[in-house]
Image: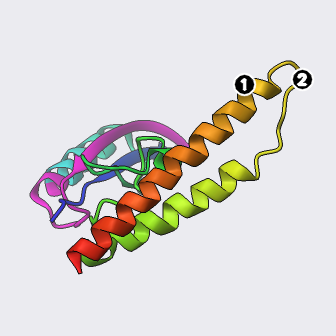
């Protein structure tokens, strides 16, 4: 099972303006995590020095090490598509097929043609369609093999 990681930023605000922050890549998004408690303690000490309030901002999960949906996640934030099986190993192939079909539809409906580059753009759309078609076929095959 893929470990869940998240990005947590804690900010100190004084009169509505941020005056300091800490960033943590926590292994799990649990407030009682030891590293998080240490951060909380450090932030309270900083708050006492500078005054103000502490605000926690939960950004989201980072991508898994084997993320295959870079198009939607930009290689940074998990979009919870489950293509990697992070959330449910049993449905990862269904999620892949759904994601690839949506991406294929988006690619095929592209209409932002630029004068002078349209030929290259059309070639790219065609190449994307072929590639995504291969990925869909591969995911369908793997889904059948997994039962």
Residue 88 visible in this rendered orientation of the protein: no
**63 and 96: which one is in front?**
96
Residue furthest left as drawn = 34
Q: Earlier in the sequence, mark 2 or mark 1?
A: 2
Q: Residues within 10 Å of mark 1 (few under 14, many from 20)?
A: few
Please state the horizontal and vertical placement of residue 123, each as a whole percent of the image: 68, 32
Q: Considering only vertical position in the picture, is 105 above or below 112?
A: below
Please state the horizontal and vertical placement of residue 89, each as a whole percent of the image: 24, 72
Please state the horizontal and vertical placement of residue 18, each as a whole percent of the image: 49, 40
**13 and 137: which one is in front?**
137
Q: Secondary structure at mark 1?
A: helix
Q: Is residue 33 highlighted in magenta?
A: yes
115 relative to 34 in the view: left or right: right
Question: Quadrant where the C terminus lies?
Answer: bottom left
Res 2 → quadrant: bottom left
Q: Is residue 47 highlighted in magenta?
A: no
**1 and 106: which one is in front?**
106
Residue range corresponding to the magenta coloring: 15-37
Q: Residue at x 18, y 59 (%)?
A: 3
Q: Residues within 10 Å of mark 2 (few under 14, many from 20)?
A: few
60 relative to 30 in the view: left or right: right
Mark 2 vs mark 1, CA separation in Å = 11 Å
The residue indicated by pointer 1 is 120
Q: How many marks?
A: 2
The residue indicated by pointer 2 is 115
Q: How is the image coloured?
A: rainbow
Q: Residue at x 33, y 76 (%)?
A: 91
**144 and 38: which one is in front?**
144
CB atoms at circles 2 and 1 under 8 Å apart?
Answer: no
């Amino acid at each position: 099972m893929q470990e869940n990681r998240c990005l947590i930023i804690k900010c100190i605000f004084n009169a509505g303006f941020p005056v300091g922050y800490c960033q943590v890549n926590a292994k799990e998004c649990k407030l009682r995590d030891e590293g998080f408690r240490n951060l909380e303690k450090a932030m309270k000490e900083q708050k006492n020095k500078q005054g103000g309030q502490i605000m926690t901002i939960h950004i989201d999960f980072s991508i898994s090490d084997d993320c295959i949906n870079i198009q939607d996640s930009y290689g940074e934030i998990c979009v919870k598509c489950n293509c990697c099986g992070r959330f449910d190993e049993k449905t990862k192939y269904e999620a892949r097929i759904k994601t690839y079909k949506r991406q294929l539809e988006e690619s095929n409906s592209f209409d932002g043609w630029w004068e002078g580059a349209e030929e290259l753009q059309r070639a790219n759309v065609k190449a994307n369609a072929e590639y995504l078609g291969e990925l869909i076929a591969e995911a369908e095959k793997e889904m059948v093999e997994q039962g």
